Image (spheres, rainbow, N blue to C red):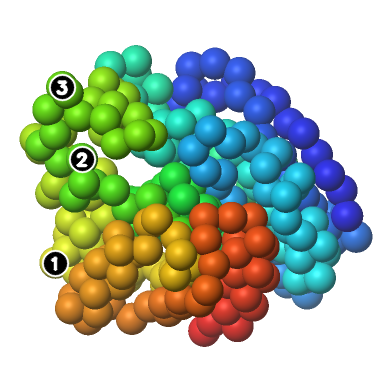
Amino acid sequence: MANLQMEYYSKSLKRQVSFSAVIPAERLEPPSPERKGLRSLYLLHGYAGSHTDWLYFTRIRELAEKHHIAVFMPSGENHFYLDDEDKGERHGEFIGSELVELTRSLFPLSRERGDTFIGGLSMGGFGAIRNGLKYNGSFGRIIALSSALILHGIAGIGPDFHNGIAGYGYYRRVFGDLNAVLGSDKDPEALVQALKAAGAELPQIYMACGTEDFLLEQNRLFHVFLTGEGVAHTYKESPGAHTWDFWNTYIAEALEWALAAD
């Protein structure tokens, strides 16, 4: 396996950016009729984290080697992997399009949607769901662990709002007009409904959340929403909190699910 720390100028973000990568070095051969390109996973960290979190706190390198899959871990910088409308920094476009195309140009990756996955935890779980749906032409599988599906909790909040994690100013900056966020392209529920209306193929979705996690109710509600919309998905609950122990267990299970999916 090869562990890489990479830096380049991002057109979407208009500056130098860094990301981590784990590549099966023994598979660094150009795709051919006899050899399929590598499957890939774009794996997103949580709030206050960095692009090295998955390397430091989980078995992702071991899992990448076991499954012969390339894993790319970018930085979300507390932006929920959404475009910053004021600064013109397009974090969603960076994750959903630019990084995918860049890594495909650098490494022998499969260009098939079904071989390209996006995943994440907490803030990164939200980013995986939103960008997996928004850029559904890029990704065939979504892995969402303890996802921060917080839109219903911040929609319409006022300037005095603070939930112990962040306040109105932060959420206004990240999500834009909080009176219009529901139903927008930042809203996973609206994206699901728009894709269904267009007759588009939705990515397959895997969700997991611990029963002691403070985000459990939000994950249950999205599970109920998907069920009500007739969207096939996998949803898991088990004892666990908002911790690396839980995520380390479920990233392994989720990869087995993704690689076994039709």
**Image quarter (top left, top right, bottom left or bottom right) of the N terminus:** bottom right
Looking at the rendered structure, the kind of residue marked 2 is Ile
Looking at the rendered structure, the kind of residue marked 3 is Pro
* Image coordinates for residue 175, horizontal then vertical, percent: 26, 33
Badge 1: residue crowd in 10 Å (few <14, some 14–19, many ≥20): few
Badge 3: residue crowd in 10 Å (few <14, some 14–19, many ≥20): few
Residue shown at 61%/18% (left/top)? 16
Observer-nearest residue: 176 or 118? 176
- The quadrant where residue 250 appears: bottom right
Label 3 sits on a secondary structure element that is loop
Looking at the rendered structure, the kind of residue marked 1 is Ala
- The quadrant where residue 216 appears: bottom left
- Specify the label residue 159 is tagged with: 3
Residue shown at 15%/41% (left/top)? 155
- Specify the label residue 154 is tagged with: 2
* Image coordinates for residue 29, horizontal then vertical, percent: 84, 57
* Image coordinates for residue 91, horizontal then vertical, percent: 43, 32
Gap in Å between the C-alphas at discs 2 and 1? 26 Å
Observer-nearest residue: 219 or 61? 219
Gap in Å between the C-alphas at discs 1 and 3? 35 Å
Instruction: Say whether disc 2 or disc 3 marks the residue closer to the N-terminus.
Output: 2
Residue shown at 65%/69% (left/top)? 249
Q: Is residue 37 left or right of residue 203?
A: right
Q: Closer to the camera: disc 2 or disc 1?
A: 2
Q: Closer to the camera: disc 1 or disc 3?
A: 3
Gap in Å between the C-alphas at discs 2 and 3? 11 Å
Q: Is residue 204 left or right of residue 1?
A: left
- Specify the label residue 120 is tagged with: none
Quickly name the residue at label 1.
197
Residue 251 visible here: no
